[in-house]
Amino acid sequence: MKAMLFYEYGNPNVLQLREVERPSLQANHVLIKVHSASINTLDWNQMTGPIMIRMLNGALHKPKINSLGLDLAGWVEAVGPQVTKFKPGDAVFGTAQGSLAEYVCATEDQLVLKPANVAFEAAAATPVAAFTAIYALSDLGKIQAGQRVLINGASGAVGSFAIQIAKAYGAEVTAVCSSRNADIAQASGASHWIDYSREDLRQHRQRYDLILGVNGYQSIFTYRKALTPTGRYIAIGGALPQILQAVALGRILSLGTSKTLQFLGVAPIRHTTLLKLQQLLESGQLKPVIDRCYRLPEAAEALRYLGAGHAQGKIVINVL
């Protein structure tokens, strides 16, 4: 089978399309024939190897994991003897390391059946970014119906999912993005839109129950001021100043107040959340925004586009 691999850290030029053996099927594994996969910032960091990522992975000089891709959608090719939820031929989506390949193995809990009314590309575009949005909004943000939610970076992968998920919870959503991306934010369900190139959030008078800072950069002090007395701010990735401020100052600035300011690194991947995403996709409440689709041999070009930081929604890799 063909798989996209890399053996040293670097830019997308380090990627190699290799012919390798199919993954061996263990007793509790599902072998999936991949139709589509999608890429995330996680893949970019895994490939380029920022020093913090290398230290966390205990791999300073050479990557321990040389495959890319986590999101996927495809068909069950075979199942191990302990697998009870799936059978060959089932259309599924979920997560598995190394999904930029023709075949990949996953456990049952990493997969759910793909709704028949959802395209493989849309299903593959969903898991990691939507996991992040749900975890930030629900687990950390404690979102409630009727709350005012501000999403900065609303046209990206996580941001566009966050708008839709917040709307599904019954929140009133304000999106912050450029005029170029306003249509995406509004199509995703935002009730209000702020053009950051024309309006300074520091002068914005509205107060919000929940703010997600997705990518980009805005001072934590600006976000703190924009919160209601019991509001919550969640920083998700973004520029280094945003990350450092959230990690170093979030807890301190929360002291003596009922406000919460914190940083979300990587959201946990849970089967219960995957089932929720399955329901939202099937009902039409969640519709992934897909910027571009590439073929597997074009994965380096896709990563290069992701790394430029201008993607509107998700980038999908079609394997078949």
Image: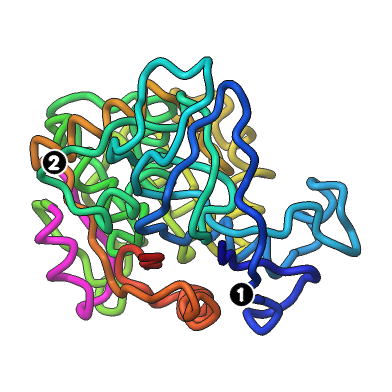
User: For the residue marked with disc 2, what is the amino acid?
Assistant: Ala
Q: Main secondary structure of the magenta part?
A: helix
Mark 2 surroundings within 10 Å by alpha-carbon count, few (fewer than 14), some (14 through 19), many (20 or more):
few
| Image position of 230 with respect to 75: above or below | above
The answer to whether the residues at label 1 and label 2 have Cβ atoms under 8 Å apart is no
Work out whether mark 1 precedes mark 2 in sequence or the reverse, and give the earlier one.
Answer: 1
In the foreground, 219 or 192: 192
User: For the residue marked with disc 1, what is the amino acid?
Assistant: Leu
Q: Does 301 appear in magenta?
A: no
Residue at 30% across / 70% down in the picture? 312
- Span highlighted in magenta in the image: 173-188
- SS for callout 2: loop
Horizontal and vertical percent position of residue 146 = 12, 29
Report whether 143 appears left or right of 179: right
- Per the model, the C-alpha gap separating discs 1 and 2 is 31 Å
| Image position of 24 with respect to 146: above or below | below
Q: Does 185 appear in magenta?
A: yes
Colouring mode (rainbow / by chain / secondary structure / one colour): rainbow
Horizontal and vertical percent position of residue 106 = 52, 35
Horizontal and vertical percent position of residue 46 = 67, 60
Label 1, on which residue?
Answer: 17
Report whether 307 appears left or right of 244: left
| Image position of 294 with respect to 53: above or below | below
Label 2, on which residue?
Answer: 116
Residue at 44% across / 28% down in the picture? 140
